[in-house]
Image (tube, rainbow, N blue to C red):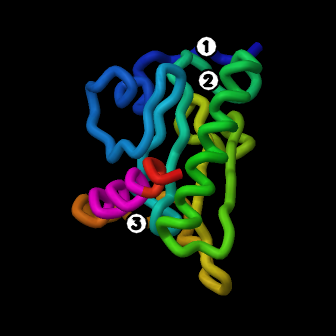
Amino acid sequence: MMPAYDPNNIFAKILRGELPCHKVYEDDRAIAFLDIMPRAPGHTLVVPKCAARNLFDVDPDELAHAAKVAQKIAKASKAAFGADGVTIQQFNESAGGQVVFHLHIHVIPRKEGVAMKPPASEKEKPETLAANAQLLAAALKGA
């Protein structure tokens, strides 16, 4: 049996406005904000607003909506950060690499020949995150 959804996970707290984030997109079903320990500049997390632990328990329509938002973010981040490509990652349960147990999709802009930083290796400066969030939000408005 799968563990129950924990409403006190960090992303649930961000969704409730209890913790800050560098938000770049929001609609009635999802939010997207920058990862504070990005693996590349512009690394964004797409988080559905529904209480879903991961791929195993999310409503398929909510998953589809999160994928649509991830595509929107990917296109905008490619333009905003001059990326050559985009890496999409989504982890499920500890064995699958999941650390925060609220469904989320990583959208990571990539440049040819530039390796990603290791996961959770370096916290980015708040002013860099704020500038990158502005860049991405502007690209999303133009999309």
Q: Which residues, given as a range, are shown in magenta?
A: 129-138
Above or below: residue 134 compared with residue 125: above
Q: Quick check: marks 3 and 1 in contact, CB under 8 Å? A: no
Residue 27 percent across, percent down from the top left: 47, 27
**Quarter assignment of residue 63:** top right
The residue positioned 49% from the left and 70% from the top of the image is: 81
Q: Nearer the viewer, residue 106 or 86?
A: 86
The residue positioned 63% from the left and 41% from the top of the image is: 98
Please state which amino acid type lies under the numbered disc 1: Ala
Q: Which residue is mark 1?
A: 4
Give how far apart the Cα atoms at labels 3 and 2 are: 25 Å
Q: Quick check: marks 1 and 2 in contact, CB under 8 Å? A: yes
Q: Is residue 78 magenta?
A: no
Residue 19 percent across, percent down from the top left: 28, 33
Above or below: residue 43 compared with residue 66: below
SS label for mark 1? loop
The residue positioned 23% from the left and 63% from the top of the image is: 127
Q: Mark 1 packing: few (<14 Cα in 10 Å), some, or many (20+)?
A: few
Q: Which residue is mark 2?
A: 53
Residue 87 percent across, percent down from the top left: 68, 60
Q: Is residue 133 magenta?
A: yes
**Residue 79, disc:** none
SS label for mark 2? loop
The prevailing secondary structure element of the residues shown in magenta is helix
Give how far apart the Cα atoms at labels 3 and 1 are: 30 Å
Is residue 130 rendered to the left or right of residue 102? left
Q: Which residue is mark 3?
A: 122
| Label located before the other in sequence (1 or 2) | 1
